[in-house]
Image: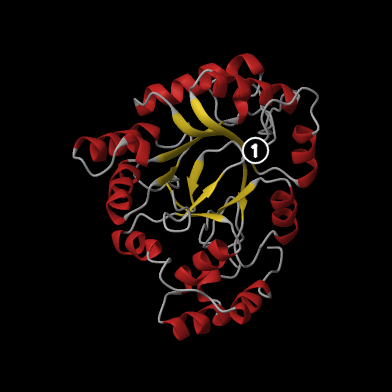
Amino acid sequence: MDLKQSHSLRLNDGHVMPMLGFGTYAPDHTPKSKAGEATEVAIDAGFRHIDAAFHQNEEKVGKAIREKIADGTVKREDIFYTTKLWTTFFRPELVHPALERSLKKLQLDYVDLFIIHNPLAMKPGEELLPKDASGNIIFDTVDLRDTWEALEKCKDAGLTKSIGVSNFSHKLLELILNKPGLKYKPTCNQVECHPYLNQSKLLEFCKSKDIVLVAYSALASHRDPNWVDPDSPYLLEEPTLKSIAKKYNRSPGQVALCYQLQRGVVVLAKSFSEKRIKENFQVFDFELTPEDMKVTDGLNRNF
């Protein structure tokens, strides 16, 4: 398989991950049905890597994938599907049942990648964000190495082909890598990454350990007021990015995605607009010059 031609990377466990993925996260104000419709549009546009999560839209996304298999657009093995272990399921005995639940929602036999959503264990139960009477989140005490061992068992059971992590720092990655009796290394670390937060140090560390960095919020367009200051800058309005885009007759979003691909970062592009979804996939037929890469690197503000 020509990885360059198929725009894929080989993971440290031998499996292959497409470098451009489609993110399916729908903010609260978006109807959940949108995620399914957008997934079908994305598969038609050429996306083969679909990134979702247990608590988001798995029924809708699973249905969209199955419909595209049924109509002959793709085979199951053409799709690289990622799901995540939510933070209330970190106790080792809850990991396998959590993945089984995702598979049931998806109506699939296996996922391609199962990752720890973020490194903060929360109180087990059906509540997504368990809170006490004062509205503070109730955390749980779980050793992430034990959670990781439970993920390894899911891989051995054939429920997932690969396993990885998300939102892990350099130190937390080392915690897993140095675990006594480690059977499988994390294949990837999915983190927020875009020109305003280019994660160059973490990327260098991940590359040195043969761990793929996967970028979410790659267009820095997430504006949820719970997380993002409304006065924060809009990456896609960044004059430097706009002038680079103009030079290549591309959009600033396409430049931001191409920038990641050229750094060897797997990048997730999220949009529910048909026009944008198609546009986001058109990033393999141009290349930024080393000079433009350097200028884009210079936009970093650890924001």
Question: Residue 98 placed where, x, y %?
Answer: 52, 21
Q: Nearer the viewer, residue 148 or 197?
A: 148
SS type, badge 1:
loop
Residue in the image at 64% along x and 38% along y = 118
Q: Amino acid at mark 1?
A: Asn
Q: Residue at image x 69%, y 25%?
A: 183
Q: Position of residue 187 (x, y in %)?
A: 62, 39
* Residue 155 place in picture, x, y as percent: 55, 24
Q: Is residue 77 left or right of residue 9?
A: left
User: Where is residue 105 shown, x and y percent of the image?
Assistant: 38, 25
Quarter in which the C terminus is drawn: bottom right
- How many numbered callouts? 1
For the view shown, which residue lies furthest in the top direction? Answer: 93
Task: Determine if residue 116 is in view.
Answer: no
Judged from this view, the residue extending furthest toward the front is 1
Q: Does 209 sit above or below residue 222?
A: above
Whether residue 289 is visible to the viewer of this picture, yes or no, is yes
| Colouring style | secondary structure
Viewer-proximal residue among 240 and 43: 43
- Check the image and report above or below for 180 versus 276: above
Residue labelled with disc 1: 118
Mark 1 neighbour class, 10 Å CA radius: few under 14, some 14 to 19, many 20 or more: some
Residue 216 in the figure: left or right of residue 185: left
Residue 129 falls in which quadrant of the image? top right
Name the image quarter holding residue 281: bottom left
Query: Which residue is found at the position 68% from the left and 75% from the top?
Result: 298
